[in-house]
Structures are given as C-alpha cells and as structure tokens.
Image (cartoon, grey):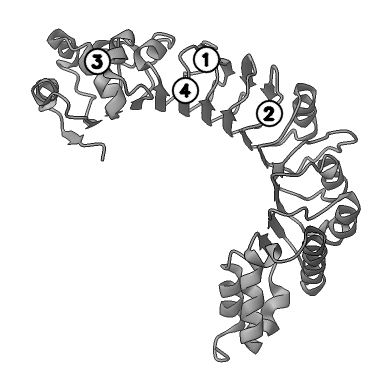
Amino acid sequence: MEKLHDSLLLQILSRLGDSADVACCRVASKSFNAVFPELRSINLRYTNIWSKDSSSMVTTSFKTVFLDLISKLRMVESVCIDVDVDPTDEDFAKEWLPKVSKSLKSLSLCFPPYDIPNVLPLISAYCRSLVELHLDFGRLSVVNLNPMPMLTSLTLELTRLEDQHLTELNTCFPNLQVLNLVGVRELKDPKIHLLNLQTCHVVVYDYPPSLTLITPKLITLKIECFVPVAIHVEAPMLSDFHLSLNTIKHVVAFSPKTFEKLKTLWLGCLYTGSLLSEFPTTKTVETLTLDSRNHEPRDARDSKLTIRKVFTVFPNVSSLCIYSGAWSELEACLNAEDWEILDGRKGLKTICAYLDLVDPSLTFSSVGPMCWLDRCLVAHPW
C-alpha cells in the first residue's frame, strides 16, 4: 500500500460511500491516514454504530465525529448526512456551517423523522457558493431565506411545504436548472415558475387539486401522480416527457407550444387510451413508450386504446414500446383494420412489445401485421 501514489490513495478514499469506511482505512494504513486531510467530502450514513446507545448519547457521538471530520479536512466541498437519529439542531448547524461555507458546493441532509424548520434559512445565510442541495426531513421554513443565485440543483423529499413557501423558493433560487419534488406534502395549488429550469421531477402523493409548471427552458420533465391532479404545463423547449398517472380521474392541459420540440414521450396510466385523447396531435415525437397500470383485462375496453389512435396522435413515431398492460388494452379493442394506418409508414422502424400470453391465438394475430418492420421485438414481461 505504501508504494501507491498519493493521488491514487486519495481517489480510493473518495470512492468510499461512507466516512466510517474511510475511518477504517485510516486505522489500517498509515498511507491512507496521511492523505486523508486532502479528502474533500464527508458522507455519514446510518449504521448499527449509531444505534447501540441511548438517543442522547448517539446524538452527542454523532456531533463529535462530524465536527472532528470537519476539523481534520483542509477543504470540504461535499457533505452528505443520512442518519436515522436526531443529528442536529439550529445551534449545532450554526456551529458547523460557517466552517465549511466558503468551499461547500454540495449538501445533502436526510433526517426523515425530524422537523428542522430553520435549516434552509441558515444554509442560505452561510453557504452562498452552494450549487447542489438535497433536503429530506419534516417541515421546512423559508422565513428569512436569502437568495442563492449559485444554486442550480434542488431536491426536496418527503418534506412539508406550503404554496407560499414554494413561491419563495421560485424567487430565491432563480438559477435552478434541476428541481426534484418527491412526495412533498401540504401543497394546495403549487406553481413552479423558474425561467432557467431544465430538468424537473415531481412525485405527488398528497391531494393538491392542481400542478402548474411555467418553465420556458425545461428540457426533461417527469411527473408521477398517485392522486387525482389537474396538470398544466407550459414548456416550449420540452424534449423528454415522462407522465405517470396512477388514478382513474385526471385532467391534463398543455399550452399549444408545449410539444413543439418533444422527441421522447413515456405515458403510463390506468387507461392509456383515455389519456391519449387529451393529447393534441404531436408530429415531433419519435420515441414513444406506452404503459398501463390496469392489470384487469375485463376493464381494458374502457380505455378504447387502438393502434389507429396512437398513430393519429403521434404520426411520426419511429420507435414504439408497448408494455404488457397497454398491449392488453390494444387486444381488448383489436380491429384488423386499425393496422392499415401503418401501411406505407416508412418512418416506423421498431416496435417492442411486452406480452401476457393469456390468449396466444389473439396475441399472435395482433403481432402478425408488424412483421414488415426493420426490428420487431416481442417479449414476455418476466
């Protein structure tokens, strides 16, 4: 180990996902211990080490270890804390944030059971150069929140956030390019209005009646809804769109320019055919994936999904992937004449279908018209 170059030793330590593993390497090797101060990241994750003592002792031990790591590193650019104990409070945050504020670029704090409402204002006060922020804990406050013009990536997960707080985030983080809102609760009528946003992922578990996105530079959008939500999107640069609706009722509204540049589209819902009816004719889509959350064959006719409807709405698709649920909907509404819409369609090169062979004769009669394609893949879903 002593013969390895310092840069290689440092790279090895950098690849370890937990600072506890780094500590083990330091104990085992003088070479690792010598290069350790040059490490630029701290990753503290929940292990059995933290669960052997009482809660207060665990918290004290955690704080001691964390502050010791900060004091030994010459520069800290990344901090990730993912523990299942109460690791911090406002006073503790005021103690360690100033020590890393000048160099810190990436910060991830995950304390799911706990409310630390004032952490975000503290981060905005100290970490003006922060580029990436991930927060996963209870209630979040934006009182006294400072602008963070350097921040380009924000992830909020399992956090309680009100509409006015989201509006404040829109104002204080004007240069966000990546936004992930995963299971954020207590939003009533959320509006995401970010002029520089390029990638957005929203997962809705709660019951906001609507979700609005006004994002002129958005390129990639993924929306997953597990409750009925009315969705309004204005994104003229959108190129890649993933929409998953796990409810029977849904309302989707798009501005006329939303799909002018759309190339890749993934659609999944209980009834795929009904969702297609809400889409305008979109000639730019080249890669289309259809999925269905409905695994009850007897209900598939309610969807009215046909191959004619698919190519009427998306006439220039060159690659089509159909998962087993959506294929079952197609079979339920099977009409041999529908396949005539593919005649002379030179742009279509590939169809990939995942099939449930409930009725083999019906399935193979459906597959037959696709044999002229450049590439036709038929696969069992398992």
Q: Secondary structure at mark 4?
A: loop
Type of amino acid under label 2 = Arg
Amino acid type at mark 1: Lys
Q: CA distance from mark 3 to mark 2?
A: 38 Å
Instruction: Using the image, tell me which numbered label, if any, was put on residue 246.
Output: 4
- Neighbor class of circle 2 (other Cα within 10 Å; few <14, some 14-19, many 20+) is many
Q: Identify whether 38 is placed above or below 281.
A: below
Q: Mark 4 belongs to which amino acid?
A: Asn
Q: Mark 1 or mark 3: which comes first in sequence?
A: 1
* Mark pair 2, 1: CA separation: 30 Å
Relative vertical location of residue 374 with respect to residue 189 in this rendering, above or below: below
Q: Which residue is mark 3?
A: 307
Q: Earlier in the sequence, mark 4 or mark 2?
A: 2
Q: Is residue 134 visible?
A: no
Point 77% across, 70% down: residue: 69
- Of labels 1 and 4, earlier in sequence is 4
Other residues around mark 1 within 10 Å, as few (<14) / some (14–19) / many (≥20): some
The residue beneath circle 1 is: 257
Question: How far across and how far down the image is residue 2, in percent?
Answer: 58, 91
- At mark 3, the secondary structure is helix
**Helix, strand or loop under label 1:** loop
